[in-house]
Amino acid sequence: MHHFYDFVAGSWQEIVKTFKILSRNKMGLFGFTMTILIIFISFGGPLIWPPETSANVAEINKGSTAKHWLGTDFQGQDNLRKVINGGRDIVVIALLTGVLSMLIAVAIGSFSAFIGGRVDSFLMEFVNIWLTIPKFPLLAVLATVLALKDVVMLSVLMAILDWPALARQVRSQVLSLKSREYIEAATMLDLGTPRIIFRELLPNMMSFIAISTIFEMTHAIYQQTGLVFLGIVPYSSSNWGVMISAAERRGVLFNPQAAWGILAPMAAIVLFQLALVSFARSLDEVFNPRLRTSV
Amino acid sequence: MPETVLSVRDLSIAYQARRGQVQAVRNISFDVERGEAVALIGESGSGKTTVGLGLMHLLPATAKVLGGNATYRRHSNGSAASEIEVLGLKGDSLRQFRWHECAMVFQSALNALNPVLRISEHFIDTANAHGYLSGYQQTAVLQERSMQLLSMVRLDPKRIWRSFPHELSGGMRQRVLIALALLLEPQLLILDEPTTALDILTQRSIMDVLKELRQKLGFAMLFISHDLALAAELADRVATVYAGEIIEIGDVRTIFREPYHPYTIGLIKAVPTLTSDKSALISVPGSPPDLIQLPTGCKFHPRCPLADERCRREETKLTEVVSGHKVACWRWPEAREVLKVYRA
Amino acid sequence: MSEPLLALEHVNRTFMVKGQTIKAVDDINLTIQAGEVLCLVGESGCGKTTTGKMIAGLLPTSSGRILYRGKDIASITDKDRKAYRLGVQMVHQDPYASLNPIQTIYQTLAAPLQHHRFTRGETETKQRVRELLEIVDLTPPDDFLEKYPHQLSGGQRQRVSVARALTVKPAFIVADEAVSMVDVSIRISLLKMFARLKDEMGVGVLLITHDLALAKYFAWDGRIGVMYLGRLVEVGQARDVVDHPQHPYTQVLLSAIPEADPDATRAKKRIELRSTDMPSLLQLPTGCTFHPRCPAYMGEVCEKIVPPLKKADWNSDVACHLVPAYES
């Protein structure tokens, strides 16, 4: 098991090196700073600008003004404030689903690829069957049945539904790397399966893993937004998805001034996605020493 | 006046890479006479393949011809030779030049043939693309000629004609490529590593086929390869390429028996033959230079035991030292001394 | 006669490809002494790489035994299996794929040293890594420790692969076309390095190659085995096999090789094959598999009976009905 710890420790060294490299790639820097900023604001913002507690009838559905940069919503509350307060759920879902599903996918995918044989065939049959199930409707049904109130529960559910597809991709990657000569050499040197997976195989896949995780995160955000929009997930708190849903219900589509009620949260989601994707694109240079112009 | 088919003068080609400009070909000059076989021999990173690609206008987008010219002379019996400036060709005239006058046979026979087309379609497509009129009469003539070529390369025409590329072995595909290249009776054939990655016996049949074809059809050949044995077998003249330039050129026998450039000397003694003595074989120390940051003076000087001040400062020029034999080395009279160092 | 390091007894290997059986290796019998240098030569598809992989333990045999230090590797104790695993190492053909691209040279070499506890602590490991780099002529070693594979040339990468194989103190190295993808001008220096391994460290080497001239040089004082369609057709001292080939296939091969000497190569008499048809591993000819193309074809006996490998002239073993057995 110490190989796993070595992997984590080695990863920390890499993280430091990573910052240095990231700062050279403008796209990645933008993505990374933006992501950190959004996370910060989503968690720290509400402490500084807590949500308004009462409606403000005089200000209903006003457009962008000096006082309310992003206009007001159907209750007269400031949209910008709502956006600041609405990010936390989204961020938690994104991170939790992304990381959890990837962890399961990597564990099962690489194990399956490495062991091969009947275990591999069985697992892949299971994955294939799983993939034929339409994910979103199933998610919708389960969400209703399980009466989810908790963001964490929703994340776990989505992770459980999404890991098979990722596992299959991980498995393909591992299979293609497995036949590389240096993996064969590691086998000949009798370095042991855990070591080979954690020290030789996975580090060569980090770029793929990181990028897949990020795309899984964007996928989770859309799923959650979709569920909220359909009213399946009850909104106990106000997050961006809820804002969109609520604004739509209040007929915002027929009132141009009230458009901010829907545009603001949408912009927030899009910005978050953009930040994640930009960050992902620059990760390739981080993980692949050959692409670096200087070490 | 010898009948020159191709005259290359001061050709320079560079690639744009992330780190800088890769000077792949630097002021290369050579001639190919009518019916002659010239071999450009060099190792990885010598720039030899780029020369071939440059002549056929097949350079990738990142490459640029920096200077020089390549003049092609079409000789037809009776009438005077007409000249074509190869590097300036475009559009129709380029299409006319390619395949009609000069054809290229590539290294990777697998990738050069379209996997979804039958061999017959390859021949018909090629002919059409280069200006053969399509009509029933022409197609029949074309087919007859194609099948004739296929048997000239020792393939069974009936069997091959309707086949797909993946149904043929590597050696057979290479022979199809050669037949295809000769379809429009070019005067010059450029071959890039024609026998690399092929088995010994297949290599042998390809080489024999090329010899026979040359005798029958009389075209000139320009080989680009790292394989000294190929040059020894087929070439009339050999040029060694190092760091983008020709450092020695001469008759095949003099190059092998009396080379004057330390690199050529080292290269020849580095290849074992079935009869060579063990103690005679050597390795050339060091590695080829970075084509982005070339050393000053003679590009071989960092690896050369004879390098002196002049070698480090002054760039060498290809000069004739013995009739028909040119060398780019300041210390060519003592060049054989390097063997003592290499053998140590 | 001391116990051989490796012994192959009636080793076969078949592959299933799309429901069809391919016999890649057919009844190989070979003994290899400790510290021996030998070459396996043949064209593509002859089974030399498969044989090399079986010797190295990367592929199991379909039938037959491989003995390491007298013990059958298919049924040995764990301790002996580990000794075998480490005792026979492999160096691959492609210098670009044989090193982990995201590890420095130091990391690549330190891993097996530390895993098997050959060295303890960073100082001791670094010292040993430096020693290994010097053995493979990568000097000064400190220049290479922190480099990544893509910063080295093909030849240098191969040397690192050899150093990696040496970390576990092997008794034998299988080099599968280890110099084929390396520049011609430095091949000899790589082969000299392998020879030094034998002289200074007693490590035996099996070089698998299609280049007979190279094989003769490398196995100068050792043996060459010629393979055709999965079978060993001639085995003997390298210089004898090349200078006095007895099996028709060996003779044809040698006559077909072009050489880096214009007069020699153009004057060579080619031996013509009976047929230019390429044999397929899916439909092996009966009897002696070379018979459809063999210029010395003798008739029915070649078609019906598989010639056994028997001692002939020059102390070589030859599998051909034409070649008389050596009567001592």
Image: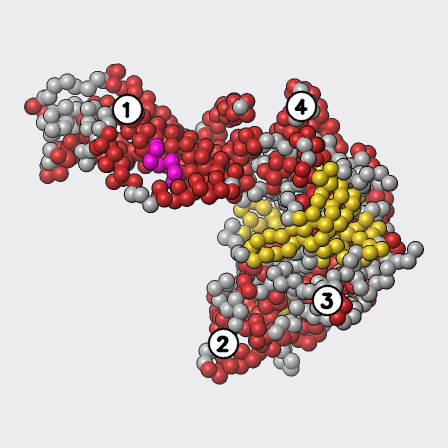
Query: Main SS of the magenta segment?
Result: helix
**Residue sitting at the far front:** C75
The chain carrying label 3 is C
Mark 3 burial class by Cα count in 10 Å: few <14, some 14-19, many 20+: some
Q: Nearer the viewer, residue B142 or A212?
A: A212
Horizontal relation, residue A274 to residue C118: left or right = left
Task: State which mark lies toward you, 2 or 3.
Answer: 3
The chain carrying label 1 is A
Residue named by callout 1: A88
Task: State which mark lies toward you, 2 or 4.
Answer: 4
**Residue sitting at the far right:** C328
Q: Quick check: B167 above or below A103? A: below
Q: Residue at x 19, y 36 (%)?
A: A230
Spatial CA distance of label 2 from label 4 is 72 Å
Q: Nearer the viewer, residue B94 or C99?
A: C99
Residue named by callout 4: C117
Q: Quadrant of the N terminus of chain C?
A: top right
The stretch of residues the image draws in magenta is: A159-165
Q: Residue at x 83, y 60 (%)?
A: C246
Q: Which mark is residue C304?
A: 3
Q: Secondary structure at mark 4?
A: loop
Residue B314 drawn at (x, y percent): 72, 44
Spatial CA distance of label 4 from label 1 is 49 Å
Q: Quick check: B315 above or below C142? A: below
Spatial CA distance of label 3 from label 4 is 56 Å
Residue B130 drawn at (x, y percent): 50, 71
The chain carrying label 4 is C
Kind of residue at disc 4 = Arg
Q: Quick check: B331 above or below B98? A: above
Task: State which mark lies toward you, 4 or 1.
Answer: 4
Asked if disc 3 and disc 4 are in contact, CB closer than 8 Å, the reply is no
